[in-house]
Amino acid sequence: VKSQGHNVNRLPKKTLLIVEDNDDDANLMKRAINTIGLDLRIQLVSNGQEAIDYLSGNREYTNRDMYPSPDLVFLDLKMPRLSGFDVLRWIRHTATTRRLIVIVLTSSNQPSDILQAYELGANSYVVKPSTFAELLEFCKALSAYWLTFNRCQDSN
């Protein structure tokens, strides 16, 4: 199908911000995403304050060509400086980020953490998969639902 002036088959690459203080978990997530061939620009930050700096375009994150606003955030809860709960609270109370898709991806299966995350506005709560095979399945489901079927306010 030809379009008038632009390629309809090439959508802009989506950006995933991974907020994770454990380098092994962050690298495993990147490996899983690459293994299944998701076409995502992956950005990593290692604590809650860095997440807020990234999302607000402060400090080293002012260049939006290098650090584009994310379409999706994976947010760990238990982090230094500011917790994932603090970041989620900030996201939902900031005009430019309040509609951002935030998936809490954490090792905590505590009912109180799950409840608090949803009360603060998480779109989804996922306990980190325990095997690489399960992580691959999570990434496939992520791709199918959040990146393919889900529509955001600015989706076409």
Image (cartoon, rainbow, N blue to C red):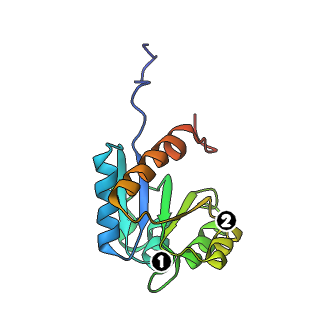
What kind of residue is marked 2?
A: Gly
Q: Quadrant of residue 86?
A: bottom right
User: x, y percentage for residue 13?
Assistant: 39, 42
Q: Quadrant of residue 93?
A: bottom right
Dividing the image into 4 quarters, which one contains the N terminus?
Answer: top left
User: For this view, does 103 lie left or right of residue 122?
Assistant: left
Label 1, secondary structure: give it. helix
Are the residues tagged 1 and 2 within 8 Å (C-beta)? no
Mark 1 vs mark 2: in front: 2
Dividing the image into 4 quarters, which one contains the C terminus?
Answer: top right
Which residue is at 68% across, 72% downward? 115
Q: Quadrant of residue 111?
A: bottom right
Q: Which residue is mark 1?
A: 48
Label 2, secondary structure: give it. loop
Label at residue 29: none
In the image shown, does 38 or 132 lie closer to the viewer? 132
- Relative to residue 55, is residue 84 depicted above or below? below
Which residue is at 59% across, 68% downward? 91
Q: For the view shown, which residue lies furthest in the right direction?
A: 119
User: x, y percentage for residue 70?
Assistant: 47, 55
User: x, y percentage for residue 63?
Assistant: 37, 60
Label at residue 121: 2
* Number of on-image labels: 2
User: For this view, does 111 lie left or right of residue 5?
Assistant: right
